[in-house]
Structures are given as C-alpha cells and as structure tokens.
Image (cartoon, helix red, strand yellow):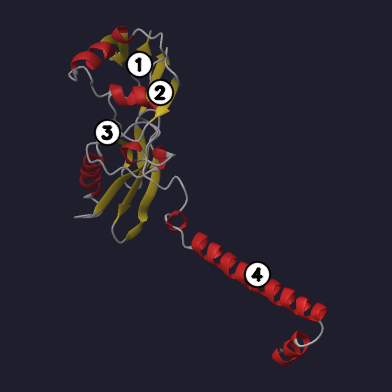
Amino acid sequence: MQNVLCRVWKGPEAARRAAAALVLVGSLVLGGCAALGDLLGSATHSPAAAAGPVGDASLPWGTPAAGTLARVEDPAYRIGPEDALELSVWKDDTLKSTAIVRPDGAISFPLVGELKVAGRTAAEVREELVRRLSRFVPEAEVTVSVARVLSYRIYVIGRINKPGEFVVGRPIDVLQALTLAGGTTPFAAEDEIRIIRREGGQQTSIPFDFARLRRKGDLSQNITLRSGDVLLVP
C-alpha cells in the first residue's frame, strides 16, 4: 500500500491531491472510531450504571414497596387477623406450616388444634406451642415468625393530599401517618386534627394540634397509632 501511495504521489498533480484526500479521510475515520469506543467504554463503566437501577434504596421504616410482605423482625409486634405466621418444629417436617390468622384471631396447628394468637407476640405464641406440644414432643424446638403483616391498618381522611387506608409493616405515629398521606392541604384546620379510636365497642376522640407542634415542637401529642385508628383532618 505504501509503494502504491508513493507512486501516486509522484504522479500528476490531480493524482497527488486524490492521495492526500484519501489519507485525510482515513485519519478521520480511525479517529472517529477511537472516540466512539471511548464514549461507549465510559458509558459502560459509569458510576450510575454500577450503582444499579433507580429505586434500590430502602424505603421509610425499613419496608419495601409492598412493605406488608416483608418478614417482621420486631419482637414487640402484636399479631393480628390476616397476618401470616410461619411455624415449625425442628426435625419434624410434619409440624411445619404457614398459617393465616383468621378474623377471630386464631389459627390451627397439628397436635395443638385451635390456638388464639391475635394480640400476642411471636415469642408468646412460641411459648404456648411448646407448652401444648410437650405432651407429644418433649422439649420441642419451636420456631414462630411473622412472615406477612396485613393486620396493621390506619385510615387518614379529610383535608389531606392522599386520603385512604394504609397497611403498614409496623406501628407508626401521627406525624408518620400524615407523611404517608402526603401532608395536609392549605385549607386544613391543623389545630383541630382528631384521632378516632375504637376501644371495647366505644369510640374515643384524641386531639392532635399540628399547628402547636410546628410552633413549639410539642411532641407529647405525637402518639403511636393503633391498628384501626382513623386520623381525621378537618
């Protein structure tokens, strides 16, 4: 190729110009390919690509988007209707099951029969199972875990940006509930918010003065909500 170019370069003026143009085009093409390779390489190894897809960050209160499906590690969590429990006895596959807590707050388990679990922690349910199984399996190694939470529900209504029912993976306070609901609207009476709670067949109304909390930082009224509480924002 070099010999050919040399012979062309020594030829007439038109041939020399054509050879020069060929050399110039070749340089541009090679330079463009190198630049394109650098661009693709930088995109492939960019920090954004290495970081993974957007949305991998943990959600508030340690729950995923479908937070209610996450296993509950809080030992103080009180089991409720519709929660799912995983129960097992070590080295006995026949005594292993996933039980959904019925509306009456009970489940069924082999050799034990009906067992009331609503209002109890996983540790308390485990102790009860060990006691009842002792007749059949002495010193049984029992494991009880809450695999899914569907019983803890709160309701936010009134002058709020996103009113509705919220199923949460663990107990939350009033401020967290307002955050879930998108905050109050500009016309909300923030000093007249009420928490409607049903206890023993009766309803009680608990005041929450959001305006006072903003002004003076009074967190004493920021109580933990119970399942079934209704947060009313007039």
Name the residue tied to disc 2.
181
Task: Determine the image quadrant of residue 181.
Answer: top left
Name the residue tied to disc 3.
78
Name the mark nearer the viewer: 3 or 4.
4
Name the residue tied to disc 1.
231
Measure how far apart labels 3 and 1 are at the Cα level.
21 Å
Name the mark nearer the viewer: 2 or 1.
2
Disc 2 marks which amino acid?
A: Ala
Disc 3 marks which amino acid?
A: Arg
Measure how far apart labels 2 and 1 are at the Cα level.
10 Å
Q: Residues within 10 Å of mark 3 (few under 14, many from 20)?
A: some
- Which residue is nearer to you in this view: 70 or 38? 38
Measure how far apart labels 3 and 4 are at the Cα level.
72 Å
- Work out whether mark 3 precedes mark 4 in sequence or the reverse, and give the earlier one: 4
Secondary structure under tag 1 reads strand
Task: Determine the image quadrant of residue 31.
Answer: bottom right
* Residue 139 visible in image: yes
- Work out whether mark 2 precedes mark 1 in sequence or the reverse, and give the earlier one: 2
Q: Which mark is residue 28?
A: 4
- Which residue is nearer to you in this view: 30 or 213? 30
- Which residue is nearer to you in this view: 7 or 228? 7
Say if mark 3 contacts mark 2, CB within 8 Å: no
Say if mark 2 contacts mark 1, CB within 8 Å: yes
- Work out whether mark 4 precedes mark 1 in sequence or the reverse, and give the earlier one: 4
Residue 144 at what x, y percent from top left?
Answer: 29, 47
Residue 216 at what x, y percent from top left?
Answer: 18, 15
The quadrant of the rendering that contains the C terminus is top left
- Work out whether mark 3 precedes mark 2 in sequence or the reverse, and give the earlier one: 3
Residue 93 at what x, y percent from top left?
Answer: 36, 58
